[in-house]
C-alpha cells in the first residue's frame, strides 16, 4: 500500500487502481456513459461552453478584455460606461426593459484568463460571474488559433432576486428565469465572437472595436 493509499484508507467511495480492478473501473465508466443526458444534469449547476477560434490567443484576450467588445458580440448588453468607481462599468441589458447591468473586468494576461463580474440593478454585489480561459490551440489541438472556454456557475441569486426593491418593474423577468437558456444563449454569443474575430484576423484587420463616430468628433 502506498503512502497515499494509507492516508486515503478511511475515505469511502474512492475509485483507484489500488482498490479497484481495471475491469471494474471500466464497467463503472461504461455505466455512467449514455447516448443522451438530461439538460438539467449537464447544465443545472454549471454551464460551460467552448469553441475553437482561428485567431491568435493574445488578440482574443485583448478583444474580450475591452468592455466595448460586448456591444459587438453579446446578444443584449450595450452602451457600457464608467459607473463612478474605478473599474466599475454600467450598461443596459436589453433582455429586460429598463434594466441596468453593472460589470467589472478581471483580466490576467499571463494566464490568458478573464472574469466578468456583473449583476443587474446594482454594482455593490457582483455575483454573476462569467469565467473565460483562452488556450493556445497550438498546445491542445496542434494548430494555430485559440480555444475559448466559458463557464457560468448557478449562484443562488439566480433563483431569487436579492434586491427586488431595485427592479424598475416588479413584473420584470429575472435573469435567473433565463438560466435554462444560458447554454443556447451563450452558444449564440460565442459564435458571434468566433465570426467577428475570424473575419478580422483572416483579413489582417485590427480585431479591436473601432471607435464610434462620436470619438472622432
Image (cartoon, grey):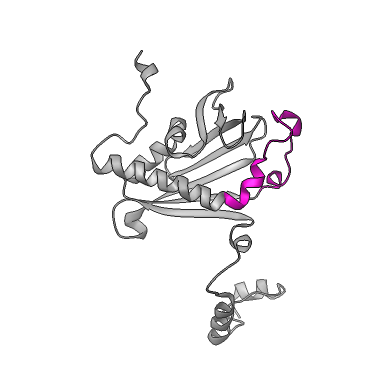
How many numbered callouts?
0
- Give the image location of residue 162, x and y in percent: 74, 38
Along the line of sight, the residue nearer the viewer: 1 or 72: 72
Which residue is farthest left? 203
The quarter of the rendered structure image containing the N terminus is: bottom right
**Vertical position of residue 117 compared to residue 19: above or below:** above
Left or right of 53, for residue 122 = right
Q: Position of residue 154 (x, y in %)?
A: 64, 50
Instruction: Examine the image and state in which quarter residue 46 appears.
Output: bottom right
Which is nearer the eye, 11 or 210? 210
Residue shown at the point (34%, 60%) measured from the top left: 141
Q: Where is the C terminus found, in terms of image quarters? A: top left
The part of the chain drawn in magenta is 155-181
At which x and y percent is residue 48? 53, 54
Reply above or below: 114 against 135. Answer: above
Image position, residue 177 (x, y; %): 66, 46
The residue under the point 59% across, 31% down is 102
Farthest residue toward the top? Answer: 217
Of the pair 54 and 4, the residue shown nearer to us? 54
Amino acid at each position: 500500500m502506498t503512502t497515499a493509499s494509507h492516508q486515503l484508507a478511511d475515505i469511502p467511495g474512492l475509485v483507484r487502481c489500488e482498490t479497484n480492478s481495471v475491469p471494474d473501473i471500466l464497467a463503472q465508466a461504461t455505466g455512467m456513459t449514455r447516448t443522451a443526458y438530461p439538460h438539467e444534469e449537464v447544465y443545472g449547476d454549471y454551464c460551460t461552453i467552448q469553441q475553437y477560434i482561428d485567431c491568435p490567443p493574445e488578440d482574443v484576450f485583448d478583444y474580450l478584455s475591452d468592455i466595448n467588445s460586448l456591444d459587438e458580440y453579446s446578444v443584449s448588453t450595450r452602451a457600457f460606461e464608467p459607473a463612478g468607481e474605478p473599474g466599475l462599468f454600467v450598461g443596459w441589458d436589453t433582455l429586460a426593459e429598463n434594466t441596468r447591468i453593472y460589470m467589472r473586468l478581471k483580466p490576467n494576461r499571463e494566464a490568458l484568463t478573464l472574469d466578468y463580474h456583473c449583476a443587474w440593478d446594482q454594482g455593490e454585489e457582483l455575483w454573476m460571474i462569467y469565467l473565460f480561459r483562452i488556450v493556445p490551440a497550438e498546445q491542445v489541438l496542434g494548430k494555430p488559433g485559440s480555444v475559448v472556454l466559458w463557464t457560468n456557475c448557478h449562484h443562488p441569486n439566480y433563483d431569487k432576486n436579492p434586491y427586488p426593491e431595485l427592479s424598475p418593474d416588479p413584473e420584470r423577468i429575472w435573469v435567473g428565469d433565463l438560466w435554462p437558456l444560458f447554454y443556447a444563449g451563450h452558444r449564440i454569443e460565442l459564435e458571434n465572437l468566433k465570426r467577428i474575430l475570424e473575419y478580422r484576423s483572416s483579413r489582417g484587420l485590427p480585431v479591436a472595436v473601432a471607435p464610434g463616430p462620436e470619438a472622432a468628433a
